[in-house]
Structure formats: structure tokens, C-alpha cells
Amino acid sequence: MKSYDIVIIGGGPAGLAAAISAKKSGIDHILILERDHELGGILNQCIHNGFGLHTFQEELTGPEYAERFIRQVKEQQIEYRLNTTVLNISSKKLVTAINQKEGMFKLQAGAVILAMGCRERPRGALNIPGYRPAGIYSAGTAQRLVNMEGYLPGREVVILGSGDIGLIMARRMTLEGAQVKAVAELMPYSGGLKRNIVQCLYDYDIPLKLRHTVVDIRGKERVEGVTLAEVDERGKPIPGTEEFYSCDTLLLSVGLIPENELSRGMGVKLNPITSGPSVNERLETNIEGVFACGNVLHVHDLVDFVSEEAAAAGRNAAAYVKAGGLKKKLGWEILLKPGQGVRYTVPEIIHPAYMNETLTLRFRVSNVYKNCYISVFFDSERVHHRKRQIAAPGEMEEVKLVKEELLKYPDLKQITVMIEEG
Ligand SMILES: Cc1cc2nc3c(=O)[nH]c(=O)nc-3n(C[C@H](O)[C@H](O)[C@H](O)COP(=O)(O)OP(=O)(O)OC[C@H]3O[C@@H](n4cnc5c(N)ncnc54)[C@H](O)[C@@H]3O)c2cc1C
């Protein structure tokens, strides 16, 4: 059985960036396992621009952004296997995978980096009444059909959900000649980036119907139309507000879920809010030497932050391997707590002894807040208070924690991040 210092599951932007940084940190025996026939992950189907503004100060398309990392993987001669699906990982880091050439095989990893990305929430999870006719797609499936396979899924479209993929597909379908009649969103705010609402809906006069949902789908063989209705504060449809839209296609963009079957199977502890692993300051899970990054950890808005986070996971995995699989005494432990208005934090725990000079704490807010403050409390003392004109659930927030500052509070037990209204 072959063994590698680091095995990375998934060759999307997270897996690629993690591999490159682990290699630059001095680890040679790295293997990326990717189930698709090419590296790059979901970015291969994101042919619009807007990627890489932070990383390269350029506006790249998804495939262009991915290509920059793929090139480095090849230049660094990092080994990868395509068309290879990881089936199982044991808590002792024994990886079982399968492909057509080798059949099923096992590999021993010194460290594992989980970078499997996320998948779309399916319609079945939504309880929409009506038949199950043709013409209902997840927005990501439609994106793949249009951008990679050259098919137009329909001509008259309604989109349910205003996450970024739904917004981007509203524009894409319009550019391909379809008529997008409305984007309906259950919440009183969009789940997507402000720039996508403006550039993908407003610029094309596509109505965004906040506090609306699909209450009926008409059509037995093929979608013939959908009924939208307004919802109350509890998300329940308000009788009398129903409006029928004739259409042949319904796209669903109703959320992403981390691909966590492998993580769960190996005994990784998951955060109930993100559905991704709970990690510490090194992005290490509860299993020593198993790290997580990218959308499998928590759903990101911008790929630039995926790459940044994954590079940190790669460095940390390299440090773990170099230390011969640290059997550490973790010592002083600080819990990170999402306070009022904050849904979760990544990481959830900090061991100052193992933290770098600065640590990026990422989180999402639970509502739209205007003229608010992002505050950080060390136990009961407020130590950061940063004004934000607007904070919305669709945009990831971050706070930088400085090790030197933490060390001034040797009895610190808990850090709370919260939103304080102005
Ligand atoms: C449908 C969809 C469309 C998106 N569109 C946009 C967009 O337009 N703009 C934007 O900024 N962001 C978009 N995103 C967000 C985007 O996914 C992230 O920014 C980024 O791609 C996340 O990188 P990742 O490497 O974590 O995940 P991914 O890019 O999803 O890569 C994960 C990789 O892991 C592989 N994998 C999973 N399980 C296994 C396994 N068991 N064995 C082997 N390989 C495995 C997958 O095949 C995949 O290649 C989209 C996401 C989705 C799901």
C-alpha cells in the first residue's frame, strides 16, 4: 500500500491552493484525489468574470482563476489522480478510493486535507406541492448545462432563491435568449452579494420578489407555470397574494450544503450551523492531522477567501507532518462564540500556543444590519468595535485576531463576536 505525507480530497480551488502551499512549506509527497475528469472544481462551469479581484487584483473568469493554480500544481510536480472518487477515510487516515483503471485501492496518509466543496440543496428538501414534471433544475445544474454542455434548459424561467448562483444564472439565461420572469426569495433580503443583485438582476430589469415563495408548480410532463405567493414573518404563504407565472423552467437556488459524508464517516465533529467540520486555529478538526478548508468547511462567497484559507490549511498540514504527527499538549484553550447577530465563527476554538501571529476569524451575520458595529469581546471586555455601513448574510465577514493581543489576557476563556446596532 502506498503512503503519502498529505492526501488532499478534492481538486477544486481549495484543494489546489492547499497542495501548493504544503509543497512550498517543504512537503514533497502530496497527492490530490479528484473525482471529476479535470482539476478546478466548480469554477470550471463559472465562466463569468469577477474572480480573483483580491488575489490577483484582476477580474478573471472561473476557469482562468482555476488555471493559475492548476499551472502551479503542474510546475511544482504535485501528483494528482483524476476520475478518482474517495469512498471512505478511516480515523487512522487510511483513504479508500476508486477509479476505472485501478479499481478500489487504499492509501495511507500522514495528514488529510478535506476539500470536497459543497453541493446544492435539492428540491426534495423544500416541500413544494405539485407534480414532478421536467423543467425543474438546480441553478448549478443549469449552469453546467449552459456553460459546459451547450444546452439551454428552457426559454421562460422563474428562479426560486436569490443566492449567488441563482442571481448569476438569471443573467446567464437572459444572455442566452431566455426570458427570466422573476427571482423569488423567501427571506426579506437576498442571500447573494450586492454586486450580483445589481449586475445580474437590476441591469436586466429582472424583478426580485423578496418574501415570496413558490406555492404550486403547474404541469404534469413539463413545467407550465408556477404560482408565487408572499409569505409572512414565519415564512408561511399569505392567502390571497398568489400570482401565476407561466414558464417552462423553474431553477432552484436554495442554498449549498458542505459535502460532508466522508467527514462524518471518519468521525469528524460537525458544526450544526455550517454543516462543516468544527475546526481550531490551524483549521484542524477534532481528529489530529485532519484539516478542512474551502466550501466543505463553510460556504464562502468569494473564491479568493477559499484560496487564502486553503493555503493556511496546507501550511498547517505541512507543519503537522514535519513535526512527525504532533502529539501535542494543547494547553490554554479559548472558545469562540457567535454572539447576537452572528450565526457562526470559523474557527471555533483557539490554542494560543499554536496560533500564528495573526488569525483570520470568518463569520456570517444572521440578518441585514445597517450602520452597525462588529464588536469583539474578550470575556466581558469589548476590545474591537468596527463600524459597518451594512452587513448582510450573503457576504462573509472577518476579524483579524493578533496573538500578541491575546497573550495580554492570560486568563481569557471566551471570545465573542457580535453585531451591535448603531
Ligand atoms: C453550482 C455552484 C456554482 C457556483 N458558482 C459560483 C460563482 O458563479 N461565483 C463564485 O464566486 N462562486 C461560485 N460558487 C462557489 C464556489 O464553489 C467556491 O468559491 C469555490 O469553488 C469553492 O472551492 P472548493 O475547492 O471548496 O470547492 P469546489 O470548487 O466545489 O471543489 C471541490 C472538489 O472536490 C471534488 N470532490 C468532492 N467529493 C469528492 C470525493 N469524494 N472524491 C474526490 N473528489 C471529490 C469535487 O469533484 C470538486 O472538484 C459556486 C458553487 C456551486 C456549488
Image (spheres, rainbow, N blue to C red):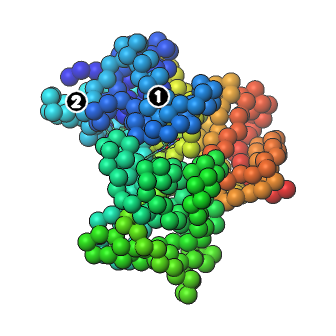
| Left or right of 75, for residue 61 | right
Q: Which numbered dot is residue 364?
A: none
As rendered, which of 400 and 368 lies closer to the eye? 368
In this view, which residue lies farthest toward the front? 177
As rendered, which of 152 and 411 lies closer to the eye? 152
- Which residue is denoted by mark 2 in the rendering? 106
Q: Earlier in the sequence, mark 2 or mark 1?
A: 1
In this view, which residue lies farthest toward the bottom? 240
Quadrant (top left/top right/bottom left/bottom right) for the C terminus: bottom right
Q: What residue appears at the point 63 percent right and 30 percent down from the top-left corner? A: 54
Q: What residue appears at the point 56 percent right and 83 percent down from the top-left corner? A: 241
Query: Type of residue at label 2?
Result: Lys
Query: Type of residue at label 1?
Result: Glu
Residues under labels 2 and 1: Cα distance?
33 Å
Residue neighbourhood size for the residue with mark 2, other residues' Cα within 10 Å, grouped as few (<14), some (14–19), many (≥20): some
Q: Which numbered dot is residue 64?
A: 1
Label 2 element class: strand
